[in-house]
Image (cartoon, coloured by chain):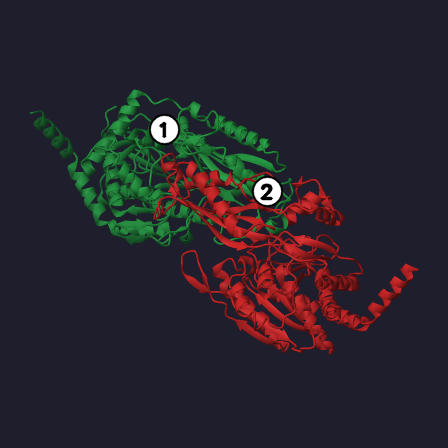
Chain colours: A red, B green
Amino acid sequence: MIWFILSLFLSLESNAHSFQFEELAKYIDSHEEEYVEILRDWVAVESVSTDVQKRPDVERMMEMTAEKLKNMQGKVELVDVGQQELPDGTTIPLPKVVTAQFGSDSSKRTVCIYGHVDVQPASKEDGWATEPYNLTDLNGNLYGRGASDNKAPVLAWIHTVEAYQKLGIELPVNVKFIIEGMEETGSDGLEAMVKVQKDSFFADVDYIVISDCGWLSRRPALTYGTRGNCYFHAAVRGLPGGPKEDLHSGVHGGTVIEPMTDLIGILSKSKKVGQILIPGICEAVSPMTEKERATYESIEFDMEDYRQNIGVERLMHSNKVELLAHRWRQPTVSIHGIEGAFSDPGSKTVIPARVIAKFSIRQVPDMDPKEVEKQVKEHLEAAFAKRGTPNKLKVTMVLGAKPWLADPQHLLYEAGKAAVKTVFNVEPDLVREGGTIPIARTFQEVVDKPIIMLPIGGFDDGLHSQNEKMSRYNYIEGTKLFAAYLHEVSQMKD
Amino acid sequence: MIWFILSLFLSLESNAHSFQFEELAKYIDSHEEEYVEILRDWVAVESVSTDVQKRPDVERMMEMTAEKLKNMQGKVELVDVGQQELPDGTTIPLPKVVTAQFGSDSSKRTVCIYGHVDVQPASKEDGWATEPYNLTDLNGNLYGRGASDNKAPVLAWIHTVEAYQKLGIELPVNVKFIIEGMEETGSDGLEAMVKVQKDSFFADVDYIVISDCGWLSRRPALTYGTRGNCYFHAAVRGLPGGPKEDLHSGVHGGTVIEPMTDLIGILSKSKKVGQILIPGICEAVSPMTEKERATYESIEFDMEDYRQNIGVERLMHSNKVELLAHRWRQPTVSIHGIEGAFSDPGSKTVIPARVIAKFSIRQVPDMDPKEVEKQVKEHLEAAFAKRGTPNKLKVTMVLGAKPWLADPQHLLYEAGKAAVKTVFNVEPDLVREGGTIPIARTFQEVVDKPIIMLPIGGFDDGLHSQNEKMSRYNYIEGTKLFAAYLHEVSQMKD
């Protein structure tokens, strides 16, 4: 009996707007090749924000994004967000931020879509099977740098609005866009811009939607938390002013105290297998509640599948809850590499004069980036001082992004569940994200409106890695999900 | 009275062949600009032997060298020395070795000049003030990669023979050349070639002269020893076959045991300030004799000058004998860099999947590269095993070059002292070299003829570093030194 009433209710509810969704879904399906082509054009732009040499490409990417939105009759602006200070003290303009608006009906809710069109560095030499900036279509996957992070999701949102427009279906909510080109470096300039436009662009925004993450498995997911990130550069060199130059390791080895030895020495003191050795870091982490543990236990997650996918012999934790906890709600240190030392294939007999380690610590509640900065500096400086070396150490925190956490019971998430049900006919996983979307916390603190992360990326998209891809399935079904979501938001009863 | 007899003797001796030397010196002085121009042409060739991509440039350099010697009517050959095996198992041809012969008068001694025309890598981005392959003439210095190591010295020897020829002065000795293009990678192929030609090319060779090193100060020097070098690659990665790809440090950080952490961990166990931590290395070193110590004490060496030149606040040792001993007759470990990790400027949030540390240990008597290979592998493998990581370590010794030591009392050195006296009117320093000339030991063991190292490079030439240079003074006066040396060798009383 209960089952009968329930299915009647579900069928009534889905019938209430099934016509529109079918039409939108059909339109989206029939435009798949067009969507792939524009993704190809976007991936071809090497919009690497971490490399200032590529700044013109990032600028071009912002202009292409603005152009696309203008062609759809959006009210579009390219917003100047100021200057970036480079390590050498000089400044260059930050890429402009694109804002756009579709509809301003005060009787409707207003949703603001955040996305980014800058990408991580990539080159064939890193081990890509295909040219990273040449979108390559293989077995239903679209390989290319930025395909999943975050160009296809941004396009999927744009195509959603376009589909409503082309079909002459009225947008159920007002839609705003805010698209940036510095996400991969920590959203430089965007925080200040959000503060400035709090009472203008953001004044009528009711909800913020971010689609810059991925599913946990083949099941669609809604994301309610991200880790933050404190990124450090630790530079070791001789005298300020010297050694300006690398030395021949045969001619001078044994007479100088090598910066590389000092750097390796202190790095080895920051981490060992499964353990962060910097005092204070782990102590600040909020303990896991019983309720939280229960949520983690209920998540569908195949450890073996995950292990095989990332290709390691053994994971850090053999228990699902522990593994997911260390992915989402525990800090971690990663050493990314060393600048200034010999990094090419082959052999070179050099004593590098100035070496800079790059490492980062993922932030979780209740860590405070300001505290972490202090803890890291004190720890490394103390370890360095103990070495009795004449070299100089300079530790700089180049990014200090806080973690973000939402309430997965909020109506926005209920709307998300309904949209997932419409498109995929399943319940989504409720997950957190190990990565960082620096601006989420800023939206939360400055704009102070509910945020949802609604991912369409696959669990195995290879973000920041070689062979990044977006599957055709996720791209197209994801666009349908967004189309359904706009409708669900308009139907929320708050 | 003694002074009077001595100066009479000196004046008589120098008069005995002063005419020829003056003529040669004048010829050399008047051809300075021509010598600079040909050095410019040679430096322009990016003959980097450590980078297989540059192999065509190395081949071209060998052909240019052969061409120059052919134009001087030498009996020249470009000798095929076989194939090089690359790390991926494929092979490519080694650069040919150039041999040449000027004169075959059996009543004369035969001197074989060894040199190399390959260079270390260099790029403007490494911090050169000028384009490294564009010879730049500033304040009497000729800046360019390979200028001092070893293109100008090779040219100086060629110009010496040419000066005798052009002036119609009979060469006082037969002169042979053996010029290679793989010195910077450990003289691949040359050892086998020397063995093969022991009884042909080398059959009539009486002495071997190498000018591939530098002075210790502004005073000319003769070199009677070099350190050897064992160069290691230590690679850490996950499963054989995976992780083939780098991982996003946000998405996966905390779930995988990172190869970079393991590598940094074991590297920190190989060395600390002023101390090699690998058991057995230092124990093999022959103790310093009292006589040796006395020799070191008598060497003119300005510690402060050296310190300022390399630009460090404090040297490893504050005592001249200790410092020179650690430069010449003690082993040292240098960590050159890490391949596979993030090494560009800026920031990237990546967990590198496969990282390869490059480090080398300079060899001195009585170390044995085979033993060192065993010691290093055992030490690193044991440290790695203790970590309990599922990652895999592979340590490879890519070069194992023995040290070389000569008797500085040998007649060849007496001839060197006389030649230095003729050109510079001073006594040379008797020095050793911290760097490695891998083929010296092979010549010693296979050809079994006396060897002298007769450097003309300056103490501050920046070999293997940014802003390598050869001064015009050393280039031109060095050519005169070689001209005088050929004569002195013909006059030796053995």
Instruction: Check contact, mark 1 vs mark 2: CB within 8 A.
Output: no
List the residue tagged with mark 1.
B329
What's the residue at 28%, 33% (across, down)? B222
- The answer to whether residue B281 of the structure is visible from this angle is yes
Q: Quadrant of residue B190?
A: top left
Residue that label 2 marks: B258
Place residue B408 in its image quadrant: top left
x, y (%) of residue B359?
47, 37
Q: Quadrant of the C terminus of chain A?
A: bottom right
Q: Nearer the viewer, residue A74 or B457?
A: A74
The answer to whether residue B79 shows anywhere in this view is: no
Amino acid type for the residue under numbered disc 1: Arg
To which chain does the residue with label 2 belong?
Answer: B
Seen at 27% across and 51% down, the residue is B34
Crowd band around label 2 with a 10 angstrom C-alpha radius: few (<14), some (14–19), many (20+): many
Callout 2: SS: loop
Vertical arrangement, residue B480 with respect to residue A22, above or below: above
A492 to the left or right of A462: right
The image quadrant that residue B243 belongs to is top right
